[in-house]
Image (cartoon, rainbow, N blue to C red):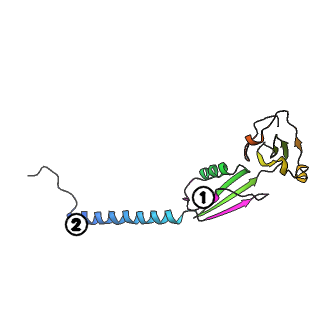
Amino acid sequence: MSSLPKSSLSKRARRVYLIAACLFGLLISVLGITLYHYTKIQQIRIVAVGESTPVYGSDGLYGVSFFETTSSIERRLKENNRHIKQLLVLRRWPNELTIMTVARRAVAQISTDGGVFYLDEEGVILKRTRLAEVDEKEMSAFPDIQFYQRILYDSYQVGDTLPFREI
């Protein structure tokens, strides 16, 4: 006599159960792969609120999974687009992204040792122009900030924020 209990399922029932489990697994795999490929981002719409501005890095979003979080996409785009004040990413099933932007707008200029910076209301540099290339018409369009500290032209790039609270 054997000390092991006999199986309550017959050999045929176990075979049917195994085949059904394999087919179910295969079906789930095929559906998962199909859904994964079907939901990759294929269309990106950029909607500008106010002034139109380019969104750098948006081309890299094609083929990204639809299930990537909008906050990670926004964070990636904000890193590449310091000239954009506000950015909102909306997903639309099954494979479309809408990116809504509000561009920064120059409100003042500040003279530096080698040129002029055009700034928004938060002190973000939107444009740099060398003194030799300054357009008088453009310079008269913005108030000129006279700052008591020397600002080095080559120390700052477009998108940087001037670290002076007084400005």
Looking at the rendered structure, the secondary structure element under dot 1 is: helix
Tell me which residue sits at (73%, 43%) in the image.
Answer: 160
Tell me which residue sits at (72%, 50%) in the image.
Answer: 86
Image position of 144 (left or right of 54): right
Tell me which residue sits at (76%, 39%) in the image.
Answer: 162
Q: Where residue 62 sits: x, y (%)? A: 59, 62
For badge 2, the amino acid type reads Arg
Q: Where residue 4 sits: x, y (%)? A: 15, 51
Front-lying residue, 73 or 29: 73
**Any magenta on residue 73?**
no
Residue 96, located in which quarter of the rendered image?
bottom right
Residue 15, located in which quarter of the rendered image?
bottom left
Front-lying residue, 15 or 64: 64
Q: Where residue 63 sits: x, y (%)? A: 55, 62
Looking at the rendered structure, the secondary structure element under dot 2 is: helix
Instruction: Give the residues drawn in magenta, as a range.
Output: 42-69
Residue 161, located in which quarter of the rendered image?
top right
Tell me which residue sits at (76%, 57%) in the image.
Answer: 49
The label on residue 98 is none
- Of the 4 image quadrants, the one containing the C terminus is top right
Residue 27 versus residue 124 in the image, above or below: below
Q: Where residue 6 sits: x, y (%)? A: 17, 55
For badge 1, the amino acid type reads Gly
Distance (Cα) linking label 2 and label 1:
53 Å
Residue for badge 2: 12
Residue for badge 1: 60
Image position of 43 (left or right of 105): left
Mark 2 is surrounded, within 10 Å at the Cα level, by few (under 14), some (14 to 19) or many (20 or more) other residues, namely: few
